[in-house]
Image (cartoon, rainbow, N blue to C red):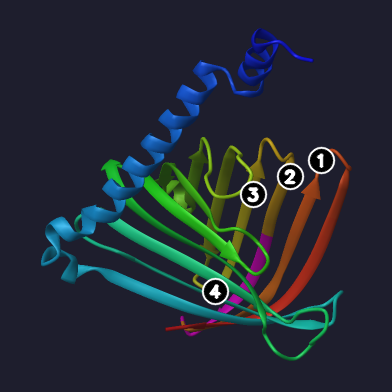
Amino acid sequence: MKTKMEAKQEKVAEKPRFGKRLWDAGKKLMAGTLACAVLALPFYSRPAMAEGKGWAIAWPGYVLHANKPTLRIEGGASFDTGTSVYAFTDFEPSKDNSVSFDTFYGEGRIAQELFKGLAAYAEVDAGSGMDSVFRPGLMYSASPGGFFLLFRVSPWSMGGAEDIQLVAYASKTFADRVFMEVLVKANILAKTIYSELGVGILFGGRLSAGIQLRMFTELEEKHTDVAPVARLGVRF
């Protein structure tokens, strides 16, 4: 039979150390504060935001190796207050239904510029069969030599498995006709990398056609899944 002292020691041992509990609480507080601040910023200057510029693209496509259709809808807007928003959603059929788009994955992000090129952002990831994930972070963008470059870092996440995420994105249009884009998204603790490589041709500024490689790498398993997607683009 355990003594009161032994029972107390076991109970204490089961709890995370005070420093870790304090750190976890601090992360949640900072994440919540950042989210509230970023999400509230647009409402401080709502009249000025009427000058914002928005865009949207629909990408119907076909996953070649899996013989199934796919649809990506993405869009964004930027405002003269330094606030910007971006979101995309991928729709695909489930394994049991090759026609209906009944599964999805999407990300939504709102950012506020702090200094030239540097911004704070709050992001929400959601999809079929997963817990929604909230990510706060910082991002930096620049346009050297006609390229558009974007770098993001999110030091933690809430709602799903905790992770550190690093993202790099680059795009460029050549001769107003051929475009390319590269996305690399690394989850440090999960030891996974998701990447996209896309090339295409523009037709009149609103239509495009090309191919995109979507790759998911599990570093511990040393395995990469590659999904080539033939796709069209319709810009609104």
Amino acid type, callout 1 = Leu
Question: Spatial distance from mark 3 to mark 2, Cα to Cα?
Answer: 11 Å
Q: At which x and y percent is residue 152?
A: 49, 43
The answer to which of marks 3 and 2 sits earlier in the sequence is: 3
Q: Is residue 118 visible?
A: no
Amino acid type, callout 2 = Thr
Return the residue at label 2. Answer: 192
**Are the residues flagged by discs 2 and 1 in contact, CB closer than 8 Å?**
yes
Q: Which residue of the protein is positioned furthest toward the front in this rendering?
A: 1
Screen quadrant of the N terminus: top right
The span picked out in magenta is 197-205
Towards the viewer: 13 or 194: 13
Report the disc number at residue 177. 4
The answer to which of marks 2 and 4 sits earlier in the sequence is: 4
Amino acid type, callout 4 = Arg
The answer to which of marks 2 and 1 sits earlier in the sequence is: 2
Return the residue at label 3. Answer: 184
Question: Spatial distance from mark 1 to mark 4, Cα to Cα?
Answer: 36 Å
Residue at 81% x, 46% y: name it.
218
Closer to the observer: label 3 or label 2?
Answer: 2
Q: Is residue 204 magenta?
A: yes
